[in-house]
Image: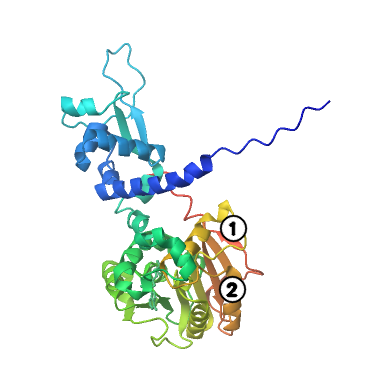
Amino acid sequence: MRPPAMPPAPPTPAPVWEIIHGFRRYWALVAALDLGLFEALASGPLDAAALAEAVGVDIHRAGLLADALAAMELLTATPEVPAVGPESQPPPAPAARPTSPASPASADHAAGSGRLVYNLGLVAANYLLAGGQRSMARLVRAAPGPHERWPELAETLRRGAPSARVEDDPGAFYPNLARGTAPVQRVVAAAVARELAAPSGHQALVVDLGAGAAPWALAFLDAWPDARGLAVELPEVVHVTREAVAADPAGDRLDVVAGSFHRVELPQGGADVVVLGHVLRIEPRTAARRLVARAAAALRPGGTLVVADYPRPEVPSPAATTETLMALTILATTGGQGAFRADDLHGWARGAGLVPGPTYTPLPGQIVLTATRPGPGAGPAAAARPVPRPGLRPLGSVYPPSKSRE
Ligand SMILES: C[S@@+](CC[C@H](N)C(=O)[O-])C[C@H]1O[C@@H](n2cnc3c(N)ncnc32)[C@H](O)[C@@H]1O
């Protein structure tokens, strides 16, 4: 006789803990950034005492934060090798930079298992140092939107809008977001600009709508040394655009206009590239469609619309976490409807007389869609790289990160 079937064992609660840990991990990372902990390790490994001194925190507390960052694989933590006689010398461990010896009291506090030497992990070295080429240090704080909107998410979902929308006070939030996104977007935009051949026979014009710190316009002007550009940004945020333009060698070819991309006069049929970088998702659908039509009307025949964004996936899955949570962020913090789908954009582009072109996937979740205005003079992308159907092209030069420190 068969034994009675056992009820299936419940799954482990680990996924729930992982979600709770997500909150802890985020704030541990923000604390590390606020304390300048990654910069403290930028020139080499430190033991807990030296790290504590560098960030101005008691050794016990600094050690706990560093341990958490090591558990998150942002730091490595290696036991320090005690100085012993030459015969019993173990293999060399990372040498900590010499510092003032820890006080006896603080050494007591560094409880437990002996002294550790902390070093930057590759992800931290590539993305979390303030001045790095691909730095996301500012973006960490800005990417979730205003933090205070998240605890009220249930109420926002019931009501249909957050208690305060980012766009009601653009100067309070967008400058941080624009400065935060710029370093990585500059690298992404440079890779996309390399894919599109510069037009010949006339001076190319690149238009960047909702430019922020203008990573897109500046990358195109860098790649196309004879081109000029036009960046449009809200009056409350345009100082960020001007700052970036002033600091960039290509900036003297970029005109900056303060105003809304819905109203500013655009060069009708004069642009070779119009960029909508992470702006469509914050617009209600009708406004997004109108904006695509405005952008399309600004293109000359052969010109290309470039849309960088995180379209909502057709089917949610762990592989589509970034774009799915990005859509929820829009809902939680703005009056936007939580992102469009790639099909929506293609429909809007076709409706505006454009032909969808290649779609690139430069970073996890981020998609760069292109569409071209057909016509004689067939311009940069269409003529140089005909693509029979929209497909996903990874831009390998952007991701994965380099194996070396910046
Ligand atoms: C997420 S940031 C993207 C910045 C940049 N395009 C990028 O891809 O990194 C969105 C930008 O759009 C700007 N923006 C929002 N609404 C706008 C409007 N109606 N007119 C012009 N700019 C606008 C914001 O101020 C902000 O700088």
Q: Can residue 193 be seen in this snapshot?
A: no
Vertical comparison of 93 with 375: above or below: above
Q: SS class of the residue under badge 1?
A: loop
Mark sitting on residue 107: none
Asked if one can make out residue 372 in the rendered structure from this viewpoint, the answer is yes
When the figure is inspected, residue 215 is found, relative to residue 292, above or below; the finding is: above
- Residue under label 1, please give it: 316
In terms of sequence position, does the residue under pointer 1 or pointer 2 come before the other? 1
Q: In which quarter of the view is residue 141 placed?
A: bottom left
Amino acid type at circle 2 is: Asp
User: How far separated are the C-alphas under marks 1 and 2?
Assistant: 17 Å
Indicate whether 381 appears above or below 84: below
- Quadrant where the N terminus sits is top right
The residue lying toward the viewer, choosing from 57 and 40, is: 57
Ligand 1 closer than 8 Å to label 1 CB: no
* Number of marks drawn: 2
**Mark 2, residue position:** 344
* Three-letter code, disc 1: Pro
Q: Nearer the viewer, residue 223 or 266?
A: 266
Residue ID at (44%, 66%)? 156
Ligand 1 lies in quarter = bottom left
Image point (50%, 83%), residue name: 290
Mark 2, Cα crowd under 10 Å, few <14 / some 14-19 / many 20+, is some
**Residue drawn 57% across and 66% down?**
359
Question: Dividing the picture into quarters, in which one does residue 83 lie?
Answer: top left
Label 2 SS: helix
Q: Position of residue 199 (x, y in %)?
A: 49, 76
Residue 308 pos. (x, y %): 48, 67
The label nearer to you, 1 versus 2, is 1
The answer to whether residue 53 is left or right of residue 205 is: left
